[in-house]
Image (cartoon, rainbow, N blue to C red):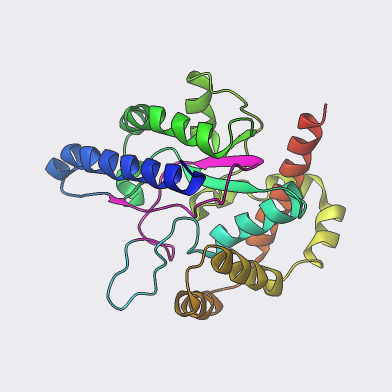
Amino acid sequence: MSFSKQYAALEAKFKAQVDRDNEDFRPHGFESKFLANIAPKGPVDYILVAMEPSFGGGSGIPTPGKALNSRNFAGSLEDFILHYCVKEYLCEGERTYYLTDLSQGAMPVAKASSSLALRYERYKRWYTLICEEIELVGPNAPIIPVGYVVRDFLEVQNTQNLTGEILHYSPSAAAHRPKIPDLQDVEFSEFKKTVDMSVIEMTIRRVMEEARLGSAPLEATLKRLRRGSGLTKSRKQLMFTYKCQFEKILKANAR
């Protein structure tokens, strides 16, 4: 069976698990919706694992009057900052990567984070599927947790090939963005001069074209993100943090 057919079969399992999750969620007044990742073309060099998709931020289930993309990790400016930094500082233009979540049903952030114990129980239900995903997409790839919640969960599961975590890109973790830049003030001052919205817009085009999401969603995404606050100091701090963290991961994996 081809890689694309194997991946499609795995997505069908993800959808079925979202349906099972909803049996638990409906009594609490909400549902999750399956939100597909950007499918890889074959096995990759790195796998980055975040928590779960969220409604909002520019990606999610298409809603009348809202320009939402139908793929995970393809909506917010932070999504594309992550793509840019992975491409530039981790893959260095030569390697490939894949972004995924521990559970793949999109839900409101408040519901997802309401209880750490319930979140871990949900992740346990998904873990067998995540292992299948890793085995298909990158059996030998380093697994990079996005945030401490993912790191802690995967460590408890004794996940193979686990490597250093990176800061979560969510604005809710923005208070942690200055930590590394503040320790390297001179380097950060120089770094700020090297990045602007043009590099992120190039990344948006590249990611969405590679994912074959179409010209209309691409232009709608660019238009929506241009109305925002742009590459603020906080977002540049996030980029510099990723640069430093990816350089550390590369150094550790080169030993």
Q: In this image, 124 relative to 188: left or right?
A: left
Q: In this image, 166 relative to 117: left or right?
A: right
Tell me where residue 166 appears, x and y as whole percent: 63, 41
Quadrant in which the C terminus is drawn: top right
Q: In this image, 94 relative to 21: left or right?
A: right
On the question of residue 127 being in view, the answer is: yes
Tell me where residue 90 appears, x and y as whole percent: 73, 47
Q: Which residue in the rendered view is the most extreme toward the left?
A: 27
Q: Is residue 55 magenta?
A: yes
Q: In this image, 177 relative to 122: left or right?
A: right
Q: Is residue 176 magenta?
A: no
On the question of residue 146 being in view, the answer is: no
- Examine the residues drawn in magenta and state their main secondary structure: loop
For this rendering, which residue is in front, 239 or 161?
Answer: 161
Instruction: Residue at 85% x, 53% y: name it.
Output: 187
Vertically, is 126 above or below 216?
above
Chain part drawn in magenta: 33-60
Tell me where residue 161 appears, x and y as whole percent: 62, 26
Q: Which residue in the rendered view is the most extreme toward the front?
A: 1
Instruction: Residue at 36% x, 50% y: name it.
Output: 109
Q: Quadrant of residue 130?
A: top left
Instruction: Residue at 45% x, 80% y: name it.
Output: 216
For this rendering, which residue is in front, 204 or 44?
Answer: 44
Vertically, is 39 above or below 164?
below
